[in-house]
């Protein structure tokens, strides 16, 4: 699974931020990594130099085998919190999509037995 980071957030050390984001994504999606080819992470600060609650944004988009992209967005007070929130949301969204697909396969298989 490839993790691609894009940011408009002025990060002092992009490599360190990229390593952190990749680790968070890997940990959140460990159970689904065989189905995911790529995760794009977009970080942003919606108010620029001004600070306000929830102004840091993290959007994640996962490419899952044979399915349309799955995207989530999370807003938080810090980039780190936004990344963790988006990773949790993305894991839940992928579980939902893969669970529905498995359930549909099971229904078709049970239906063909009878």
Image: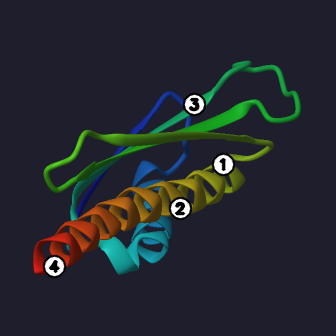
Which residue appears at 34% of the width and 63% of the height?
98
Crowdedness of circle 1 by 10 Å Cα count: few (<14), some, many (20+)? many
Of the image marks 3 and 1, the number of the one nearer the N terminus = 3
Q: Which of the two labelled residues, at mark 1 and mark 4, occupies the earlier sequence position?
A: 1
Between 17 and 68, the one nearer to me in the picture: 68
Residue 63 relative to residue 61: left or right: left
Q: Quadrant of residue 47?
A: top right
Percent x, y of residue 102: 29, 69
Quadrant holding the C terminus:
bottom left
**Pointer 2 with pointer 4, Cβ within 8 A:** no
What residue does disc 3 label? 44
In the displayed structure image, the side of residue 35 where residue 94 appears, left or right: right
Label 4: which residue?
A: 114
The numbered mark at residue 82 is: 1
Element marked by disc 3: strand
Asked which secondary structure carries label 4, the reply is loop
């Amino acid at each position: 699974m490839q993790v691609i980071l894009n940011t408009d957030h002025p990060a002092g050390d992009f490599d360190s931020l990229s390593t952190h984001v990749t680790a968070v994504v890997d940990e959140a999606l460990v159970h689904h990594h065989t189905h995911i080819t790529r995760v794009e992470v977009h970080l942003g600060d919606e108010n620029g130099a001004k600070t306000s609650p929830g102004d840091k944004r993290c959007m994640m988009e996962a490419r899952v085998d044979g399915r349309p992209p799955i995207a989530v967005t999370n807003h938080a007070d810090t980039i780190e919190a936004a990344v963790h929130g988006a990773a949790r949301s993305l894991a839940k969204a992928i579980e939902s999509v893969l669970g529905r697909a498995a359930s549909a396969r099971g229904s078709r298989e049970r239906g063909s037995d009878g």
